[in-house]
Image (spheres, grey):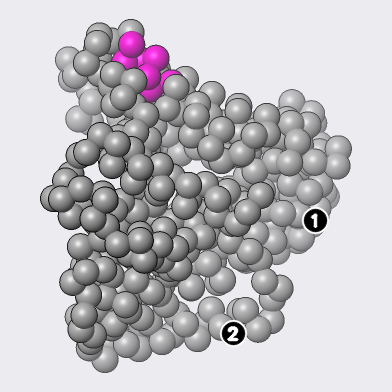
Amino acid sequence: MPLAISFFTFQQIAFLTDCYKKVDTNDLQEGSKNIDFIDYCLFVSFFPQLIAGPIVHHKEMMPQFKANETIKIELIAKGVFIFCIGIFKKIFIADSFAKWANAGFGYVENGGILNIVESWVTSLSYTFQLYFDFSGYCDMAIGLGLMFGIILPMNFNSPYKSLSITEFWRRWHITLGRFLKDYLYIPLGGNKFGKLLTLRNLFIVAFLSGIWHGAGWGFVIWGTLHGLAMVIHRIYSYYSSSFKFINFRVYKVFCWFITFNFLNITWIFFRSQNLDGALNLLKGMFGIVWIELPQKLRFPFILEHIGGRNDTIIYLILAFIITLIFKNSIEMLNSFKPNLKNAIFAGFLLYLALITLSITPYVEFIYFNF
């Protein structure tokens, strides 16, 4: 498949649909026929976000291309700042988790069964690899865009802080969710024709988002599970507003725990190259097949099959802290000031990323596959 075919196809679908419906005519320069073909080609092929998003809309890009005539030092500084954060996420964090995730999934896909610790470390490693890999790319894309004076939309908003599957999809891959809402959910009727059809529409959108990522059975199962979760949560939300305990902190922690673990489990089907591998990993995670831990209860022995070390657990703990407590990159960008402190911070992140890249093999961006 051509690299990034789904991303630039979606952008052109949105453009053609809006032209056909003749909506946003002011943004379309009083009709699509007046848009310069070279400007259109730039819109489709603007390289910072071409390969893996964010999926941009013509009405947020065309005016910027027309108005972008001067270099703005402040935007360049912001671009370098968030680009350094993005490349640090990808190379230093995501690629570190990739070693353990790839080793674990490779083992179970070939018929092996991991012990319970290895299984959970494998699934969590991929959960964090995917987040830091994809959000890192989007940060780099936003940074490159800012260097050209172009503001690209936010694509992530701390999705692992979500307390429900609905909130997760409002925070994860935001531009894909926006596209599916505008060009699939609303045309299907949205929530205008009763609760039953609303539930149907939610399931269809989530299911097709799985198919968008790939035609394998793992993606079908992943989309189906998310569709069912969206339906169940919407049914629950119809009645939960009257519950008094929904404002209790314990309830919110429980909601986060359920949501995060649902995401962690469903990512297994998203990642595994075959269903047997996904099932083997789940068996190890939940003790369906009993595998004894080694006699030496030290992590290099416990995590032997995935090449884990003592710092593997430290990485997982730090990943939880970064995703749940710290500001995300967009929040940091919004409060950015071009001073020595931020310059040193960005330079340090870039230095760590480049040092890591020089001593470890390159791992391609995950969403290059889609």
Say what secondary structure mark 1 lies in: helix
Asked if 188 appears above or below 138 in the picture, the reply is above
Circle 1/circle 2 CB separation < 8 Å: no
At horizontal 27% and vertical 87% (from top left) the residue drawn is: 341
The residue where tag 2 is placed is: 355
The residue where tag 1 is placed is: 304
Disc 2 residue type?
Answer: Ile
Q: CA distance from mark 1 to mark 2?
A: 26 Å
Please tell me whether residue 45 belongs to the stretch shown in magenta: no
Asked if 297 appears above or below 203 in the picture, the reply is below
| Left or right position of 170 against 51 | left
Predominant SS along the magenta part: helix
Quadrant of the image occupied by residue 29 = bottom left
Asked if 193 appears above or below 99 in the picture, the reply is above
Q: Is residue 138 visible?
A: no
Q: What are the residue bounds of the magenta stretch?
A: 197-203
**Circle 2 Cα neighbour tier, 10 Å, few/some/many (<14 / 14–19 / ≥20):** few
At horizontal 36% and vertical 66% (from top left) the residue drawn is: 38
**Which numbered dot is residue 227?**
none
Q: How many marks?
A: 2
Q: Is residue 274 visible?
A: yes
Disc 1 residue type?
Answer: Glu
Say what secondary structure mark 2 lies in: helix
Residue 347 picture location, percent across and down: 41, 87
Residue 195 picture location, percent across and down: 28, 10
Please tell me whether residue 202 belongs to the stretch shown in magenta: yes
- In-front residue for pair 260/250: 260
Asked if 107 appears above or below 43 in the picture, the reply is above
Residue 187 picture location, percent across and down: 31, 24
Residue 31 picture location, percent across and down: 20, 48
Of the numbered discs 1 and 2, the one sitting upstream in the chain is: 1
Farthest residue, direction bottom: 340
